[in-house]
Image (cartoon, rainbow, N blue to C red):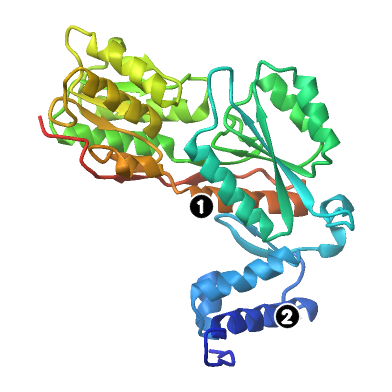
Amino acid sequence: MKTLERTNGKGSRAFLHVQLSNILRTQIADRTYRVGDKLPSEVELGKTYSVNRATVRRALQKLISERLIYRIPASGTFVSDNARVDAKYTQTAEGEINVAWVIGIGANRVLGPFHALLFSNVSNELSRFQQHLVFFSMDQSECDDLIIANIRQKKIHAIFLVGHFPGHLFEKFKKLNVPIVLLDNSLSDNSVDCVIADNDRGAYDATCRMIEKGHRRIACIRAPLKEAATQERFRGYIHALTDAGIAFYEELVVEGNFQSDGGEVAMEKLLSLKFPPTGVFCFNDEMAIGAMKAIRNHGLKVPEDISIVGFDDIEWSSHAIPPLCTVHVPIEEIAYAGVQLLENRMQRPSSVPYKVLIPARFVERSSIGKR
Protein backbone atom coordinates (compact mmCIF):
# COMPACT_ATOMS: atom_id res chain seq x y z
CA MET A 1 0.00 0.00 0.00
CA LYS A 2 1.26 3.48 -0.92
CA THR A 3 0.46 6.51 1.21
CA LEU A 4 0.18 10.04 -0.10
CA GLU A 5 1.75 12.84 1.89
CA ARG A 6 -0.96 14.42 4.04
CA THR A 7 -1.26 17.92 5.40
CA ASN A 8 -3.44 19.37 8.12
CA GLY A 9 -6.18 21.87 7.49
CA LYS A 10 -9.12 22.33 5.20
CA GLY A 11 -7.05 22.03 2.03
CA SER A 12 -5.80 18.50 2.69
CA ARG A 13 -8.30 16.71 0.48
CA ALA A 14 -7.55 18.95 -2.52
CA PHE A 15 -3.85 18.38 -1.92
CA LEU A 16 -4.34 14.62 -1.94
CA HIS A 17 -6.27 14.59 -5.19
CA VAL A 18 -3.60 16.77 -6.84
CA GLN A 19 -0.90 14.38 -5.62
CA LEU A 20 -2.76 11.38 -6.99
CA SER A 21 -3.39 13.02 -10.37
CA ASN A 22 0.32 13.90 -10.58
CA ILE A 23 1.29 10.29 -9.83
CA LEU A 24 -1.03 8.92 -12.49
CA ARG A 25 0.09 11.55 -14.99
CA THR A 26 3.72 10.49 -14.42
CA GLN A 27 2.81 6.82 -14.82
CA ILE A 28 1.12 7.60 -18.13
CA ALA A 29 4.13 9.64 -19.28
CA ASP A 30 6.63 6.89 -18.43
CA ARG A 31 4.31 4.28 -20.03
CA THR A 32 3.51 2.38 -16.87
CA TYR A 33 0.06 2.75 -18.37
CA ARG A 34 0.09 2.76 -22.18
CA VAL A 35 -2.45 4.04 -24.69
CA GLY A 36 -5.62 1.94 -24.42
CA ASP A 37 -4.68 0.45 -21.04
CA LYS A 38 -7.40 0.26 -18.42
CA LEU A 39 -6.57 2.01 -15.16
CA PRO A 40 -7.30 0.38 -11.79
CA SER A 41 -10.82 1.00 -10.53
CA GLU A 42 -11.66 3.86 -8.16
CA VAL A 43 -11.87 1.36 -5.30
CA GLU A 44 -8.50 -0.18 -6.19
CA LEU A 45 -6.79 3.20 -6.45
CA GLY A 46 -8.31 4.22 -3.12
CA LYS A 47 -6.90 1.14 -1.42
CA THR A 48 -3.50 1.51 -3.09
CA TYR A 49 -3.02 5.13 -2.01
CA SER A 50 -5.11 5.10 1.20
CA VAL A 51 -7.57 7.77 0.06
CA ASN A 52 -11.34 7.82 -0.20
CA ARG A 53 -13.28 7.37 -3.41
CA ALA A 54 -14.20 11.07 -3.69
CA THR A 55 -10.50 11.95 -3.76
CA VAL A 56 -9.84 9.35 -6.45
CA ARG A 57 -12.74 10.64 -8.55
CA ARG A 58 -11.44 14.23 -8.34
CA ALA A 59 -7.97 13.08 -9.42
CA LEU A 60 -9.36 11.13 -12.37
CA GLN A 61 -11.64 14.00 -13.37
CA LYS A 62 -8.61 16.28 -13.56
CA LEU A 63 -6.88 13.88 -15.96
CA ILE A 64 -10.07 13.48 -18.00
CA SER A 65 -10.27 17.27 -18.39
CA GLU A 66 -6.68 17.16 -19.68
CA ARG A 67 -7.72 14.41 -22.13
CA LEU A 68 -5.09 12.03 -20.82
CA ILE A 69 -7.73 9.47 -19.90
CA TYR A 70 -11.39 8.83 -20.72
CA ARG A 71 -14.14 6.92 -18.98
CA ILE A 72 -16.61 4.42 -20.46
CA PRO A 73 -19.59 3.89 -18.13
CA ALA A 74 -19.78 0.34 -16.72
CA SER A 75 -16.45 -0.53 -18.37
CA GLY A 76 -13.73 1.55 -16.71
CA THR A 77 -11.19 4.32 -17.27
CA PHE A 78 -8.65 4.10 -20.08
CA VAL A 79 -5.53 5.92 -21.25
CA SER A 80 -6.25 8.02 -24.33
CA ASP A 81 -4.08 8.71 -27.30
CA ASN A 82 -3.94 12.46 -26.91
CA ALA A 83 -2.04 12.86 -30.18
CA ARG A 84 -4.94 11.37 -32.11
CA VAL A 85 -7.63 13.63 -30.74
CA ASP A 86 -9.22 15.52 -33.63
CA ALA A 87 -8.31 19.21 -33.50
CA LYS A 88 -11.97 20.19 -33.80
CA TYR A 89 -12.55 18.76 -30.32
CA THR A 90 -9.78 20.71 -28.61
CA GLN A 91 -10.25 24.12 -27.08
CA THR A 92 -9.23 26.96 -29.32
CA ALA A 93 -8.25 30.56 -28.63
CA GLU A 94 -11.75 31.61 -29.64
CA GLY A 95 -13.25 29.98 -26.53
CA GLU A 96 -14.80 26.83 -25.16
CA ILE A 97 -16.10 23.82 -27.01
CA ASN A 98 -19.82 24.23 -27.73
CA VAL A 99 -22.09 21.27 -27.04
CA ALA A 100 -25.70 21.55 -28.21
CA TRP A 101 -28.61 20.56 -26.01
CA VAL A 102 -31.53 19.98 -28.38
CA ILE A 103 -34.92 19.11 -26.91
CA GLY A 104 -38.07 18.56 -28.91
CA ILE A 105 -40.90 20.21 -27.00
CA GLY A 106 -43.75 19.68 -29.46
CA ALA A 107 -46.65 22.02 -30.14
CA ASN A 108 -48.43 21.48 -26.78
CA ARG A 109 -45.54 20.78 -24.44
CA VAL A 110 -43.19 23.02 -22.49
CA LEU A 111 -39.88 22.35 -20.80
CA GLY A 112 -40.67 20.83 -17.40
CA PRO A 113 -38.72 20.65 -14.13
CA PHE A 114 -37.22 17.23 -14.90
CA HIS A 115 -35.48 18.34 -18.08
CA ALA A 116 -34.61 21.74 -16.62
CA LEU A 117 -32.74 20.02 -13.79
CA LEU A 118 -31.15 17.56 -16.21
CA PHE A 119 -29.90 20.50 -18.31
CA SER A 120 -28.38 22.12 -15.22
CA ASN A 121 -26.59 18.93 -14.21
CA VAL A 122 -25.24 18.26 -17.71
CA SER A 123 -24.02 21.84 -17.92
CA ASN A 124 -22.19 21.49 -14.60
CA GLU A 125 -20.55 18.24 -15.72
CA LEU A 126 -19.40 19.77 -19.01
CA SER A 127 -17.89 22.77 -17.24
CA ARG A 128 -15.31 20.42 -15.74
CA PHE A 129 -14.06 19.85 -19.28
CA GLN A 130 -14.16 23.56 -20.11
CA GLN A 131 -17.09 22.92 -22.42
CA HIS A 132 -20.21 25.02 -22.82
CA LEU A 133 -23.80 23.76 -23.22
CA VAL A 134 -25.88 25.67 -25.80
CA PHE A 135 -29.66 25.34 -25.39
CA PHE A 136 -31.98 24.71 -28.36
CA SER A 137 -35.68 24.11 -27.69
CA MET A 138 -37.31 22.79 -30.79
CA ASP A 139 -40.97 22.84 -31.71
CA GLN A 140 -41.07 19.92 -34.13
CA SER A 141 -43.60 21.78 -36.27
CA GLU A 142 -40.81 24.19 -37.21
CA CYS A 143 -38.76 23.86 -40.35
CA ASP A 144 -36.12 21.15 -39.83
CA ASP A 145 -33.56 22.84 -42.06
CA LEU A 146 -33.84 26.11 -40.13
CA ILE A 147 -32.97 24.33 -36.88
CA ILE A 148 -30.03 22.49 -38.44
CA ALA A 149 -28.72 25.73 -39.97
CA ASN A 150 -28.93 27.45 -36.59
CA ILE A 151 -26.89 24.68 -34.99
CA ARG A 152 -24.27 24.91 -37.73
CA GLN A 153 -24.04 28.68 -37.21
CA LYS A 154 -23.23 28.19 -33.52
CA LYS A 155 -20.18 26.05 -34.46
CA ILE A 156 -21.37 23.08 -32.41
CA HIS A 157 -18.82 20.32 -31.70
CA ALA A 158 -21.19 17.71 -30.23
CA ILE A 159 -24.91 17.22 -29.56
CA PHE A 160 -27.17 15.94 -26.80
CA LEU A 161 -30.58 15.02 -28.23
CA VAL A 162 -33.08 15.01 -25.38
CA GLY A 163 -36.35 13.12 -25.59
CA HIS A 164 -38.08 11.95 -28.74
CA PHE A 165 -37.14 12.98 -32.29
CA PRO A 166 -38.72 11.63 -35.49
CA GLY A 167 -36.48 9.42 -37.62
CA HIS A 168 -36.11 11.81 -40.57
CA LEU A 169 -34.93 14.61 -38.29
CA PHE A 170 -32.52 12.35 -36.45
CA GLU A 171 -30.91 11.45 -39.78
CA LYS A 172 -30.32 15.15 -40.45
CA PHE A 173 -28.55 15.51 -37.12
CA LYS A 174 -26.31 12.56 -37.96
CA LYS A 175 -25.25 14.29 -41.20
CA LEU A 176 -23.72 17.09 -39.13
CA ASN A 177 -20.91 14.59 -38.49
CA VAL A 178 -20.39 15.41 -34.82
CA PRO A 179 -20.73 13.10 -31.79
CA ILE A 180 -24.33 12.57 -30.66
CA VAL A 181 -25.61 11.20 -27.34
CA LEU A 182 -29.29 10.58 -26.64
CA LEU A 183 -30.60 11.48 -23.17
CA ASP A 184 -33.94 10.20 -21.86
CA ASN A 185 -34.35 8.26 -25.10
CA SER A 186 -32.97 5.24 -26.93
CA LEU A 187 -33.11 3.62 -30.35
CA SER A 188 -34.29 0.05 -30.86
CA ASP A 189 -31.16 -0.80 -32.87
CA ASN A 190 -28.81 0.72 -30.23
CA SER A 191 -26.91 2.48 -33.03
CA VAL A 192 -26.23 5.65 -31.02
CA ASP A 193 -24.86 6.26 -27.53
CA CYS A 194 -27.72 6.82 -25.11
CA VAL A 195 -28.56 7.16 -21.43
CA ILE A 196 -32.03 6.36 -20.14
CA ALA A 197 -33.61 5.46 -16.81
CA ASP A 198 -34.86 1.92 -16.19
CA ASN A 199 -38.42 3.01 -16.93
CA ASP A 200 -39.75 -0.52 -17.30
CA ARG A 201 -38.62 -1.62 -13.83
CA GLY A 202 -39.63 1.66 -12.22
CA ALA A 203 -43.16 1.44 -13.63
CA TYR A 204 -43.38 -2.22 -12.64
CA ASP A 205 -42.40 -1.45 -9.03
CA ALA A 206 -44.83 1.48 -8.78
CA THR A 207 -47.76 -0.58 -10.07
CA CYS A 208 -46.82 -3.53 -7.86
CA ARG A 209 -46.88 -1.28 -4.80
CA MET A 210 -50.53 -0.42 -5.46
CA ILE A 211 -51.29 -4.09 -6.01
CA GLU A 212 -49.63 -4.92 -2.68
CA LYS A 213 -51.94 -2.37 -1.04
CA GLY A 214 -54.96 -4.27 -2.37
CA HIS A 215 -55.76 -2.32 -5.53
CA ARG A 216 -57.08 -4.26 -8.51
CA ARG A 217 -58.61 -1.57 -10.69
CA ILE A 218 -55.48 0.43 -11.53
CA ALA A 219 -55.50 3.02 -14.29
CA CYS A 220 -52.58 4.73 -15.96
CA ILE A 221 -52.19 8.23 -17.34
CA ARG A 222 -49.52 7.96 -20.00
CA ALA A 223 -47.98 10.23 -22.62
CA PRO A 224 -47.82 9.67 -26.41
CA LEU A 225 -46.39 6.21 -27.15
CA LYS A 226 -43.92 7.57 -29.72
CA GLU A 227 -41.55 8.34 -26.83
CA ALA A 228 -39.24 5.56 -25.62
CA ALA A 229 -39.80 6.43 -21.96
CA THR A 230 -43.58 6.15 -22.42
CA GLN A 231 -43.31 2.79 -24.17
CA GLU A 232 -41.11 1.39 -21.41
CA ARG A 233 -43.27 2.69 -18.55
CA PHE A 234 -46.38 1.31 -20.22
CA ARG A 235 -44.67 -2.06 -20.61
CA GLY A 236 -43.78 -2.10 -16.91
CA TYR A 237 -47.37 -1.25 -15.96
CA ILE A 238 -48.74 -4.08 -18.13
CA HIS A 239 -46.18 -6.59 -16.80
CA ALA A 240 -47.13 -5.81 -13.21
CA LEU A 241 -50.83 -6.38 -13.92
CA THR A 242 -50.09 -9.58 -15.83
CA ASP A 243 -47.83 -11.01 -13.12
CA ALA A 244 -50.54 -10.35 -10.54
CA GLY A 245 -53.25 -11.97 -12.68
CA ILE A 246 -55.16 -8.67 -13.01
CA ALA A 247 -57.13 -8.04 -16.20
CA PHE A 248 -56.11 -5.12 -18.41
CA TYR A 249 -58.88 -2.73 -19.46
CA GLU A 250 -58.38 -0.22 -22.28
CA GLU A 251 -60.78 2.21 -20.61
CA LEU A 252 -58.33 2.59 -17.75
CA VAL A 253 -55.58 3.94 -20.04
CA VAL A 254 -55.84 7.66 -20.75
CA GLU A 255 -53.31 9.78 -22.61
CA GLY A 256 -51.86 12.92 -21.06
CA ASN A 257 -49.04 15.23 -22.11
CA PHE A 258 -46.39 15.06 -19.32
CA GLN A 259 -47.83 18.32 -17.88
CA SER A 260 -50.12 18.96 -14.91
CA ASP A 261 -53.01 20.20 -17.04
CA GLY A 262 -52.86 16.99 -19.08
CA GLY A 263 -52.98 14.94 -15.89
CA GLU A 264 -56.00 16.89 -14.67
CA VAL A 265 -57.93 16.41 -17.92
CA ALA A 266 -57.05 12.70 -18.05
CA MET A 267 -58.18 12.20 -14.45
CA GLU A 268 -61.52 13.83 -15.25
CA LYS A 269 -62.05 11.17 -17.92
CA LEU A 270 -61.24 8.39 -15.45
CA LEU A 271 -63.60 9.83 -12.84
CA SER A 272 -66.41 9.89 -15.41
CA LEU A 273 -66.28 6.09 -15.80
CA LYS A 274 -69.11 4.00 -14.36
CA PHE A 275 -66.50 2.23 -12.24
CA PRO A 276 -63.59 4.63 -11.66
CA PRO A 277 -60.17 3.25 -10.72
CA THR A 278 -59.08 2.96 -7.10
CA GLY A 279 -55.47 3.64 -8.05
CA VAL A 280 -53.76 5.61 -10.84
CA PHE A 281 -50.18 5.34 -12.07
CA CYS A 282 -49.12 8.58 -13.77
CA PHE A 283 -46.14 8.51 -16.11
CA ASN A 284 -44.61 11.58 -14.47
CA ASP A 285 -45.06 13.64 -11.32
CA GLU A 286 -46.48 16.68 -13.07
CA MET A 287 -49.42 14.69 -14.43
CA ALA A 288 -49.85 13.06 -11.01
CA ILE A 289 -50.15 16.47 -9.35
CA GLY A 290 -52.73 17.49 -11.97
CA ALA A 291 -54.66 14.26 -11.33
CA MET A 292 -54.68 14.98 -7.58
CA LYS A 293 -56.20 18.39 -8.30
CA ALA A 294 -59.02 16.81 -10.33
CA ILE A 295 -59.70 14.35 -7.51
CA ARG A 296 -59.97 17.18 -4.97
CA ASN A 297 -62.26 19.13 -7.31
CA HIS A 298 -64.70 16.19 -7.15
CA GLY A 299 -64.74 16.28 -3.36
CA LEU A 300 -62.63 13.12 -3.11
CA LYS A 301 -59.45 12.52 -1.17
CA VAL A 302 -56.03 11.03 -1.89
CA PRO A 303 -55.38 8.30 -0.82
CA GLU A 304 -58.65 7.59 1.05
CA ASP A 305 -60.72 7.45 -2.15
CA ILE A 306 -58.14 7.13 -4.92
CA SER A 307 -54.42 6.37 -4.70
CA ILE A 308 -51.90 8.13 -6.94
CA VAL A 309 -48.28 7.38 -7.86
CA GLY A 310 -46.01 9.41 -10.13
CA PHE A 311 -42.61 9.05 -11.79
CA ASP A 312 -39.35 11.12 -11.75
CA ASP A 313 -39.36 12.38 -8.13
CA ILE A 314 -39.16 16.08 -9.00
CA GLU A 315 -38.95 18.50 -6.06
CA TRP A 316 -42.68 19.25 -6.20
CA SER A 317 -43.59 15.64 -5.43
CA SER A 318 -42.44 15.73 -1.81
CA HIS A 319 -44.39 18.99 -1.23
CA ALA A 320 -47.68 17.76 -2.70
CA ILE A 321 -50.65 17.25 -0.37
CA PRO A 322 -50.38 14.44 0.47
CA PRO A 323 -46.70 13.87 -0.40
CA LEU A 324 -46.58 11.89 -3.63
CA CYS A 325 -45.37 8.31 -3.93
CA THR A 326 -43.17 8.22 -7.01
CA VAL A 327 -40.21 6.62 -8.76
CA HIS A 328 -36.90 8.38 -8.23
CA VAL A 329 -34.84 8.96 -11.38
CA PRO A 330 -31.24 9.91 -10.45
CA ILE A 331 -30.74 12.93 -12.72
CA GLU A 332 -27.16 13.44 -11.54
CA GLU A 333 -26.23 9.92 -12.69
CA ILE A 334 -27.88 10.42 -16.08
CA ALA A 335 -25.96 13.67 -16.55
CA TYR A 336 -22.67 12.13 -15.46
CA ALA A 337 -23.08 9.07 -17.71
CA GLY A 338 -24.15 11.21 -20.67
CA VAL A 339 -21.10 13.45 -20.44
CA GLN A 340 -18.77 10.46 -20.05
CA LEU A 341 -20.28 8.87 -23.17
CA LEU A 342 -19.80 12.12 -25.06
CA GLU A 343 -16.17 12.42 -23.99
CA ASN A 344 -15.56 8.80 -25.01
CA ARG A 345 -17.18 9.41 -28.40
CA MET A 346 -14.91 12.43 -28.96
CA GLN A 347 -11.87 10.37 -28.06
CA ARG A 348 -12.92 7.23 -29.95
CA PRO A 349 -15.38 8.21 -32.71
CA SER A 350 -15.48 4.71 -34.20
CA SER A 351 -16.07 2.82 -30.94
CA VAL A 352 -19.15 0.65 -30.43
CA PRO A 353 -22.20 2.64 -29.21
CA TYR A 354 -23.17 2.19 -25.57
CA LYS A 355 -26.59 2.15 -23.94
CA VAL A 356 -26.44 3.08 -20.26
CA LEU A 357 -29.48 2.05 -18.21
CA ILE A 358 -29.78 4.01 -14.95
CA PRO A 359 -31.67 2.21 -12.13
CA ALA A 360 -34.86 3.88 -10.89
CA ARG A 361 -36.08 3.49 -7.30
CA PHE A 362 -39.60 3.54 -5.86
CA VAL A 363 -40.11 6.21 -3.17
CA GLU A 364 -42.78 5.51 -0.55
CA ARG A 365 -44.70 8.56 0.71
CA SER A 366 -48.39 9.07 1.53
CA SER A 367 -50.45 8.95 -1.70
CA ILE A 368 -51.12 5.19 -1.80
CA GLY A 369 -53.70 3.83 0.61
CA LYS A 370 -54.96 0.34 1.42
CA ARG A 371 -58.11 -1.10 -0.13
Residue that mark 1 sits on: 333
Amino acid residing under circle 2: Gln
**Kind of element beneath mark 1:** helix
Q: Residue 306 carries which label?
A: none
As drawn, which residue projects farthest toward the left? 371
Residue 70's spot in the image, x, y percent?
Answer: 69, 61
Residue 201's spot in the image, x, y percent?
Answer: 37, 38
The residue at the point 41 percent across, 19 percent down is 256
Name above or below for residue 58 compared with residue 249. Answer: below
Label 1 or label 2, whichever comes before in sequence order: 2
Q: Tell me if residue 284 can be seen.
A: no
CB under 8 Å between discs 1 and 2: no
Name above or below for residue 85 compared with residue 309. Answer: below
Residue 338's spot in the image, x, y percent?
Answer: 60, 48
Q: Tell me if residue 280 can be seen.
A: yes
Q: Judge from the rendering whether residue 128 lies leftward or rightward of residue 13; answer left or right.
A: right
